[in-house]
Image (cartoon, rainbow, N blue to C red):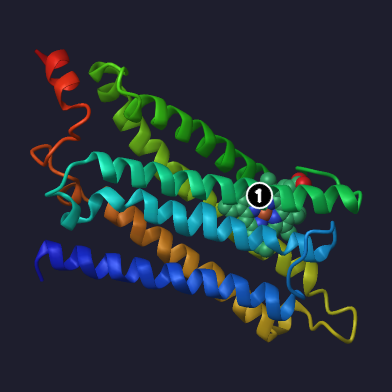
Amino acid sequence: MNSMMIFYLLYFLCLCLSVACVICVCVWNSLWRGGFAWDGSQLEFNWHPVLMVTGLVVLYGNGAVLYRIPLTWGYDKLPWKLLHAALMLLSLILSVVGLCAVFNYHNAKNIPNLYSLHSWIGIAATALFAIQWVAGFAGFLLPWTPLSMRKLLKPVHVWLGGSILILSIAASISGINEKLFFALKGQTNETQPYSSLPPEALVGNSLGVLIVVFGLIVLRILSTSEWQRPDSSPEDQTYAPILREESD
Ligand code: HEM
């Protein structure tokens, strides 16, 4: 199988896993956790996993591999840069709303904030993502940023981008595990213990597996140099004259 076919196969898998992750996290929180509200109750908490998985895992991962799609290489880079920035901004907004949901819920129920390993990894992932977005916007989208600065920033941006994805996957898995331990104590007639692997636990565990496979595929696409947008493909028209002047 040639390299491009492998890319498209992995990319197709990536899209299927994206849909599967979003469906799975929504089904879990609708059918087993009672659905959604914005009132400081447990139902407000339920927005947290849905928005974090949709924003910081699925949208983020798809935004990260956008430049790797060979079909986009024949066109100017600027529209793809803008789409990349827009997808990442949407992902950041969903993540921040997802964090507001859990902080509101904790404050309403007098539960301490930021005590768990999950919350430390999660807050680090979101903070780094916010810094990465601002640095990426300033470095790659503002026309007056010097070319030398862009060259310096690019490898850091690529490395930090992959690291943030790893952190958000670690946060998602630890969050799912924590939630299943909290919810499935088996102390009431309604809940069976986690250890007896009731249907809810199967769905939660499967969501974790889907997220890990999605993350591994995104990281595989990002780490294959053959699938990087070639330097010879059209640069964005807006900056081309500025960049040429600077490199003269
Ligand atoms: C990228 C994904 C995620 C990030 C960045 C993240 C981040 C956070 C943060 C910062 C908190 C602390 C809130 C506070 O202290 O008030 C938190 C709490 C929590 N999250 Fe997540 N989360 C993510 C995904 C998930 C998922 C998928 C679940 C699954 C249900 C989950 C379950 C929980 C639970 C149960 C808490 C409350 C207990 C605790 O503070 O550890 N999280 N999360």
Residue 184, quarter of the rendered image: bottom right
Q: Tell whether 80 sits left or right of 120.
A: left
Whether residue 216 is situated above or below residue 117 in the rendered picture: below
Whether residue 159 is situated above or below residue 15 in the rendered picture: above
Label 1 SS:
helix
Q: Please tell me which residue is depicted at 66% across the width and 49% down the height of the picture.
A: 97
Query: In the rendering, at what x and y percent does residue 99 appear?
Result: 68, 48
Query: In the rendering, at what x and y percent does residue 26 appear?
Result: 61, 72
Mark 1: few/some/many CA within 10 Å (<14, 14-19, 20+): some
Q: Tell whether 88 sits left or right of 114.
A: left
Query: In the rendering, at what x and y percent does residue 12 appear?
Result: 29, 70
| Residue type indicated by callout 1 | Val
Residue 118 visible: no
Q: Please tell me which residue is depicted at 18% across the width and 66% down the height of the picture.
A: 6
Disc 1: which residue: 97
Residue 87 visible: yes
